[in-house]
Image: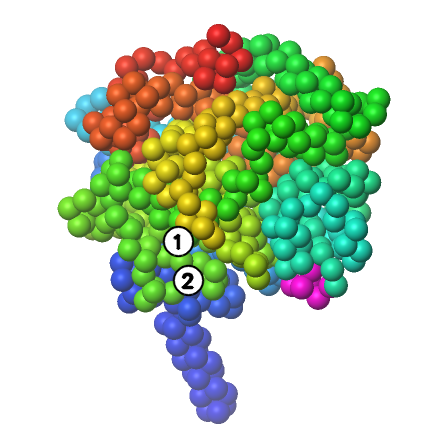
């Protein structure tokens, strides 16, 4: 018996020791408390989640059991500050899950999903907690709150109502089950989308089949083949591989093969998402109905800058009506050019458009990626993009090699303000790998906040899938990748320059249709001659990019802009079609999407094509019933940048105002108010259409 007790004691001691050694649960000794990525292992995550949830619930219980009358400090602020450990753990885990996943992390995510949902329900459906929140809210006008405090109170109260706090006990139980089911479905959707992307490889062993591909594309294909243990050249469905192949390959049969694999990803087979799309929509319809909304879109849009589904529809129509005929004209011009150059009498298909569009652009603008890429060496672009922030906002970036990263490709920078004050750590992760999802995004391992008088500055991250270096050349960006870099850097600035008191209102925690303003406005500098000439140098000769080449970049800026706009509006239409409805469509996912897009197509739809099955923005991320936000923010950005154009694109008075009124404020005030304060008027759709030259 004594031996058993001793063994139990040793086990408890070991468990306690493991907890103490868990790098997710102890204060980091690194500069600024940076995550200990060199020590964090998969086995640390689950215990850390369990501990974080335990601590968070204890903090909620302390608020509820407080014998004092509810006040802003002991209820609203206390709730805002609760869950610090869980926030830290989740902020690291979910970002690594996207950027450097593996099967074990995916299994942990599935295990943690119901735990996190239950924790969220523990808060949002807590009658006693809501009673205290409601009591404070009822006396809000008597409390003498500052503007950000009032904002926090109103958002907290509204969050409870929108989270089901007014539901009956029976409905709360059902609501919780729906939320848990939804979280698991979203995880499976993302897992399938990544699996489907990684599952297909086009391996070419006959060099004759590389016809039309420039050397940089061939080098990339050879590198990918070597990584996969294959002979020859390999191309896959990730953007840096897929896009240039479709642009340059003269082999229509191979383009079709790659295209069909791309547009039918996760449609049937091992990674089928067709039914998961419907299940996700069904869960969201049920959730919206339980909360008193006719559709999920009504629920989602109510809490955004645009205000209503009717406004979303009218906004998209304002853009579509002039853009669709312009897009048809663009396609007709490319088709005429293709027929003049041996295409035949066929109609342009999806696997033809990128190829002939690239040839047309090259013929009329003498511009293509092969010409431009040598001038955009990644290292120079990094220096230039960071340097733009120095020029506009006075901030500086110093690479830190003493702070560990989560993958060997990642670098981290110490960001400081003009006065030397530390602002953020900035992690950059540029290259594709099988463990990273496709696309480009900005995120945070820790957001900015002030807790108990101590400020936590943010840990911001940018993740992309830019072309890797090859044996023959360094990483060279396309101009599109440069503007993508600027876009995500704009999001990064929104996080790095945050100056809020409350984390839930700071940085990028703003309305979904406002969050893209700081990112989209940054893309404009990618077309400014003075800026481009400051860094764009040929990686072999050192030649500064010629003026006439920049002139061609600017002249081609609106090339195929109507087609691109219609494509984005198609995505927005698919999004609203799924979520602005009271029940599931009778058709299957593929047929439903086809019917939704009828009348909007500019090229024929390929058999079985479906974007919904990999449309992570609306099925596994936060843009459901909100994809229109990209166009809404593009209008904001066009209107806002016109002030820079008027005063000077490097005017520090304008950039200072943008920082003070937009980048630093987060959601501490109403976003429409912040925009008017910077620009002097409400956003105007015409500003974008005129900039695109769709209307005069």
In terms of depth relative to the viewer, which is nearer, 292 or 498? 498
226 in magenta: yes
Q: Earlier in the sequence, mark 2 or mark 1?
A: 2
499 lies left or right of 477: left
Visible in this render: residue 225? yes
Mark 2 and mark 1 residues within 8 Å of each other at the beta carbon:
yes
Work out whether 685 lies above or below 652.
above
Q: Residue at x 48, y 68 (%)?
A: 41
Q: Which residue is drawn at 50% across and 46% down?
A: 374
Tell me the residue that label 1 is attached to: 427
User: What color scheme is it?
Assistant: rainbow
* Coordinates of residue 56 in the picture (x, y in percent): 38, 52
Tell me the residue that label 2 is attached to: 405
Work out whether 285 lies above or below 9.
above
In terms of depth relative to the viewer, which is nearer, 516 or 641? 641
In terms of depth relative to the viewer, which is nearer, 612 or 493? 493
* Coordinates of residue 75 in the picture (x, y in percent): 28, 39
Q: What element carries label 1?
A: strand
Rendered image: mark on residue 225: none
667 lies left or right of 691: left
Q: Which residue is drawn at 45% across and 30% down?
A: 548
Region rendered in magenta: 225-230
Q: How crowded is mark 2: few (under 14 residues within 10 Å), some or many (20 or more)?
A: some
Q: Quadrant of residue 665?
A: top left
In terms of depth relative to the viewer, which is nearer, 54 or 364? 364
Q: Residues within 10 Å of mark 1 (few under 14, many from 20)?
A: many
């Amino acid at each position: 018996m004594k031996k058993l007790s001793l063994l139990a004691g040793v086990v408890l001691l070991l468990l306690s020791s493991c907890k103490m050694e868990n790098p997710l649960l102890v204060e980091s000794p690194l500069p600024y408390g940076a995550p200990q990525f060199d020590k964090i292992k998969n086995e640390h995550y689950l215990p850390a989640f369990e501990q974080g949830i335990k601590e968070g619930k204890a903090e909620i219980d302390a608020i509820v059991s407080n014998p004092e009358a509810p006040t802003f400090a002991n209820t609203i602020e206390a709730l805002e500050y609760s869950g610090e450990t869980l926030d830290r753990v989740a902020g690291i885990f979910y970002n690594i899950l996207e950027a450097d996943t593996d099967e074990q992390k995916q299994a942990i995510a599935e295990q943690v999903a119901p735990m996190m949902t239950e924790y969220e329900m523990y808060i949002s459906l807590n009658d006693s907690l809501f009673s205290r929140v409601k009591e404070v809210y009822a006396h809000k006008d008597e409390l003498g709150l500052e503007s950000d405090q009032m904002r926090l109170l109103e958002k907290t109260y509204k969050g409870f109502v929108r989270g089901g706090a007014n539901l009956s006990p029976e409905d709360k139980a059902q609501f919780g089950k729906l939320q848990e089911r939804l979280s698991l479905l979203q995880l499976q959707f993302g897992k399938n989308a990544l699996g489907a992307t990684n599952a297909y490889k086009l391996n070419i062993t006959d060099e004759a089949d590389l016809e039309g591909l420039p050397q940089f594309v061939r080098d990339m294909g050879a590198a990918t083949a070597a990584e996969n243990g294959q002979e020859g050249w390999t191309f896959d469905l990730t953007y840096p591989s897929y896009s240039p192949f479709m642009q340059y390959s003269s082999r229509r049969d191979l383009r079709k093969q790659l295209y069909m694999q791309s547009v039918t990803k996760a449609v049937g087979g091992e990674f089928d998402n067709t039914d998961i799309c419907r299940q996700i929509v069904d869960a969201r319809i049920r959730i919206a109905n339980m909360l008193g909304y006719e559709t999920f879109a009504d629920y989602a849009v109510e809490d955004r800058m645009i205000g209503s589904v009717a406004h979303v529809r009218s906004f998209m129509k304002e853009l579509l009506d002039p853009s669709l005929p312009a897009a048809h004209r663009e396609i007709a011009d490319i088709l005429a050019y293709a027929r003049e150059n041996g295409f035949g009498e066929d109609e342009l298909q999806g696997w033809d458009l990128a190829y002939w569009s690239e040839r047309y652009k090259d013929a009329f603008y003498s511009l293509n990626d092969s010409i431009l890429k040598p001038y955009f060496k990644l290292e120079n672009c990094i220096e230039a993009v960071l340097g733009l922030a120095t020029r506009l906002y006075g901030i500086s970036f110093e690479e830190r090699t003493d702070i560990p990263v989560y993958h060997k490709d990642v670098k981290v920078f110490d960001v400081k303000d003009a006065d030397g004050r530390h602002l953020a750590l900035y992690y950059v992760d540029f290259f594709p790998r099988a463990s990273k999802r496709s696309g480009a995004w900005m995120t945070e391992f820790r957001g900015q906040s002030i807790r108990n008088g101590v400020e936590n500055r943010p840990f911001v991250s940018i993740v992309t899938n830019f072309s890797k270096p090859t044996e023959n050349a360094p990483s060279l960006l396309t101009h599109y990748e440069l503007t993508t870099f600027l876009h995500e850097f704009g999001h990064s600035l929104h996080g790095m320059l945050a100056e809020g008191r409350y984390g839930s209102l700071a940085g990028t925690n703003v309305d979904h249709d406002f969050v893209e303003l700081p990112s989209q406005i940054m893309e404009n500098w990618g077309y400014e001659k003075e800026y481009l000439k400051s860094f764009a140098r040929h990686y072999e000769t050192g030649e500064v990019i010629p003026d006439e080449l920049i002139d061609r970049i600017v002249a081609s800026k609106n090339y195929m802009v109507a087609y691109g706009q219609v494509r984005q509006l198609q995505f927005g239409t698919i999004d609203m079609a799924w979520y602005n409805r009271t029940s599931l469509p009778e058709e299957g996912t593929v047929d439903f999407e086809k019917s939704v897009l009828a009348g909007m197509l500019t090229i024929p739809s390929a058999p079985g094509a479906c974007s919904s099955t990999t449309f992570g923005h609306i099925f596994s991320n936060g843009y459901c019933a909100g994809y229109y936000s990209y166009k809404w923010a593009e209008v904001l950005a066009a209107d806002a940048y016109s002030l820079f154009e008027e005063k000077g694109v490097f005017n520090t008075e304008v950039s200072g105002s943008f920082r003070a009124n937009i980048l630093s404020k987060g959601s501490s005030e109403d976003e429409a108010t912040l925009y008017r304060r910077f620009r002097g008027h409400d956003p105007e759709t015409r500003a974008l259409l005129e900039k695109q030259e769709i209307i005069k």
